[in-house]
Amino acid sequence: MSRLIFLGVPGAGKGTQAALLAESQGIPHISTGDILRAAVKNQTPLGVQAKGFMDAGNLVPDSLVIDLIRERLQEPDALKGWILDGFPRNVPQAGFLEQLLQEINQSCDRTVNLDVADEVVVKRLVERGLASGRSDDTEDTIRHRLQVYREQTEPLIAFYRDRGALVTVNGDQPMDAVTTALKAAIAV
Ligand code: ADP
């Protein structure tokens, strides 16, 4: 059973690696970005509220993602484990998660920091934007998301290191090598 949090700059490969690992472990991959993008696409109340923040490369208000995570982690498929990708993304969200896990008698096994240099991810994301048409993958918005990451999400590395559950994996390697390194890092 695994309960894992994935941290890393936009474009570090969290989504790809989290999906692969979740599949191989038979646990859900819970990506707040994917859930929000689906909500935007379907024009649900959540999507309507989130769209402007996402297009600008800002975080959506904590209350929106907190409600979503509270419900998602209590669904039956998440009882045996999960991989969180894109949540928590700031210190208040991490505080909320700690409290929620306590309430539902769960604990996180590891936090994985997928490490990739800024220049590498800007190039990856510009390419992804061209290929996928994702509206927040333009160069200016990408640079803004990196800045948001530095200011709001990076402090979580110290937060989880202090709790003794942080592992760092080099994300600037071929995809298979990252998967291998990741599996080794969470096995210890
Ligand atoms: P990336 O890591 O490439 O930025 P994500 O799919 O994780 O992509 O997130 C895309 C956007 O969704 C973010 O820029 C933000 O607007 C929103 N988002 C996702 N997760 C959260 C969260 N936990 N808190 C606030 N906003 C979020």
Image: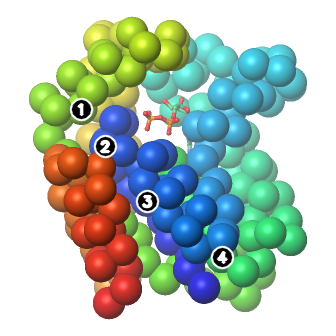
Distance from Cα at disc 3 to Cα at disc 4: 14 Å
The answer as to whether callout 1 falls within 8 Å of ligand 1 is no
Q: Secondary structure at mark 1?
A: helix
Distance from Cα at disc 4 to Cα at disc 2: 23 Å
Distance from Cα at disc 1 to Cα at disc 3: 16 Å
**Residue identified by numbered label 2:** 12
Say what amino acid the circle numbered 2 marks. Ala
Tell which residue pokes out farthest to the front in this image.
176
Q: Earlier in the sequence, mark 4 or mark 2?
A: 2
Q: Is residue 16 found left or right of 108 in the rendered image?
A: left
Q: Residue at x 83, y 18 (%)?
A: 43
**Residue identified by numbered label 1:** 121
The answer as to whether callout 4 falls within 8 Å of ligand 1 is no
The answer as to whether callout 2 falls within 8 Å of ligand 1 is yes
**Residue identified by numbered label 4:** 81
User: Badge 4, how many Cα within 10 Å: few under 14, some, many 20+?
Assistant: many
The answer as to whether callout 3 falls within 8 Å of ligand 1 is no
Q: Are marks 3 and 4 in contact (CB under 8 Å)?
A: no
User: Badge 3, how many Cα within 10 Å: few under 14, some, many 20+?
Assistant: many
In x, y percent, where is residue 141? 37, 15
Say what amino acid the circle numbered 4 marks. Gly
Q: Is residue 171 found left or right of 85 in the rendered image?
A: left
Q: How many marks?
A: 4
Q: Earlier in the sequence, mark 2 or mark 3?
A: 3
Q: Secondary structure at mark 3?
A: strand
Quadrant (top left/top right/bottom left/bottom right) for the C terminus: bottom left
